[in-house]
Image (tube, coloured by chain):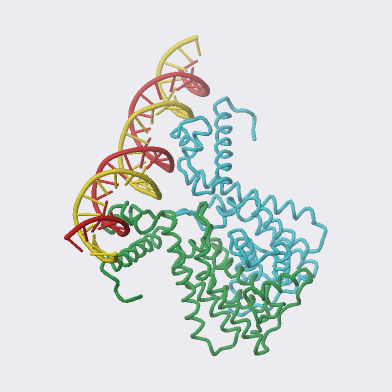
Chain colours: A green, B cyan, C red, D yellow
Amino acid sequence: MNIPQGARARARTEITAAIKDEARRQLAADGAAKLSLRAVARNLGMVSSALYRYFPSRDDLLTALIIDAYDSLGAAAETAHEAVADESPAVRWTAVCEAVRGWALGHPHEYALIYGSPVPGYVAPQTTVPAAARVGLLLIGVVRDAHERGALNPPPLPGELRAEAERMTADFAPGLPLEAAAPLVAAWAQLYGLVGFELFGQFHRVVEAREPFFRDAVTRLGQSIGLRA
Amino acid sequence: MNIPQGARARARTEITAAIKDEARRQLAADGAAKLSLRAVARNLGMVSSALYRYFPSRDDLLTALIIDAYDSLGAAAETAHEAVADESPAVRWTAVCEAVRGWALGHPHEYALIYGSPVPGYVAPQTTVPAAARVGLLLIGVVRDAHERGALNPPPLPGELRAEAERMTADFAPGLPLEAAAPLVAAWAQLYGLVGFELFGQFHRVVEAREPFFRDAVTRLGQSIGLRA
DNA sequence: CTCAACCGAGAGCACTGCTCTCCCAACCAG
DNA sequence: CTGGTTGGGAGAGCAGTGCTCTCGGTTGAG
């Protein structure tokens, strides 16, 4: 990103990038579990121990890939959103949802890496949080926008969720009506349920017309928060 | 299940069960990826090669565990359902959903095994289908029952989903009104989105009051199919 | 120009899934 | 009761893994 700071440093960033690229290739081809440091090193013409100068462990490489995947997904969603920025909130909502699904179908193993079961004993470091939040923030923005232009009719807020809803809006969704907070978070999770089931084969012989089915489901998901079609 | 058919056959079923038990222990402790055939054999006092007489590969052992996990989850859901069999469909719906969540929280690694990202290159054999279908059939039964007693108000059916809905009801949900088919399947997937997000840490610092949040979400999920509270 | 930091190479350790061969014990037919 | 067949445990071995450590050569800062 900066002015070249010496051959050494530049080589380091280049090699780091090359490692990630090769790792991403293997990830896309065979999935996270088959990603092998030795194979990455081999394909890069280096010896496996040299790779540890760049990533102290396999988990650190995976973490880097996870952040990249979150960013790639977030960018795809944001791009799709910009293309319909002038439309109604309901249209923008489904556009973002369909972008998530599209990205997932195009990057199944990367999707599995970030939204599938966490790799054994692996705990995502805090570093991943900002990248992971991008899609969520985008959805919050759509719903808040609907609220601001008076196009939001959220369902009533159950009393036992009032405190939770207040905390949610204060923490990460300022400007959102209390009634929309929990339904929005739930819809966010449910979106990934739909995508995951399709991607991981749970819809095999159950859902055939995948696209219309998904469009219908996320439209109703938007309605469940109060976005009217 | 039968009359003892000789020491040989009995020993075989006993050892097979012992292997599965030990494997399940390791699965619960460390997750699927760390399940090691050699470690299982070691803890059972046998040599690793002997284990291949019972399970031809690691994947076959995993498949057996997957089927058991589906059955365990299905049994938990059915038990929970029976306990409220006399209640309204809406109550039974949330009871089944909460049973799924409860089982998942109690068996995180087994849940990850069946609903997380499929293990690398692993494809579930047809054998798993009946066990996997139990929860789905239970939910179908609840909604059909609501329909039969006139307590179901499904949303309108979009034209582009009519053929799909006809196929769905014909294939696995006879007696269900066309309008309910797609919303039900979607709700089924969305339920696992909610559970998965909680289980895999996506709700960390996002949802604090997990139980009321979940109860509210699945109640609205039921309403989205037409079950009135 | 010197010296520390950097980093690639290679050997090695402990582990994995899986195969193959050997050999004994259980079983069934005659 | 016996003899051949089969089931299954033991052990060695192969190819692969993540990771560590040591040895040198190169780079770049003081």
Closer to the camera, A212 or A37?
Answer: A37
Task: Residue lying at the far right in this picture: please name it.
Answer: B86
Q: Indicate the quadrant containing the N terminus of chain A: top left, top right, bottom left or bottom right.
A: bottom left
Q: Is residue A27 left or right of residue B138?
A: left
Q: Position of residue C22 (x, y in %)?
A: 35, 23
Q: Residue at x 62, y 56 (%)?
A: B133
Question: How many numbered markers are drawn?
Answer: 0
Residue A169: image location, x then y, percent = 67, 76
Image coordinates for residue B16, horizontal then vertical, percent: 55, 36
Q: In this rendered view, identify the residue nearer to me: A161 or B123.
A: A161
- Residue A94's place in the image compared with C24, above or below, is below
Residue B142 versus residue B46 in the image, above or below: below
Quarter assignment of residue B148:
bottom right
B12 left or right of A53 in image: right
Front position in the image: B189 or C9: C9
Residue occupying image coordinates x 58% and y 25%? B6
In screen coordinates, is C27 left or right of A146? left
- Image quadrant holding the C terminus of chain A, namely bottom right
**Residue D9 location, x and y as percent?**
47, 27
Please give the name of the residue rendered at 55% of the width and 31% of the height, measured from the top-left corner: B12
Q: Quadrant of residue D13?
A: top left
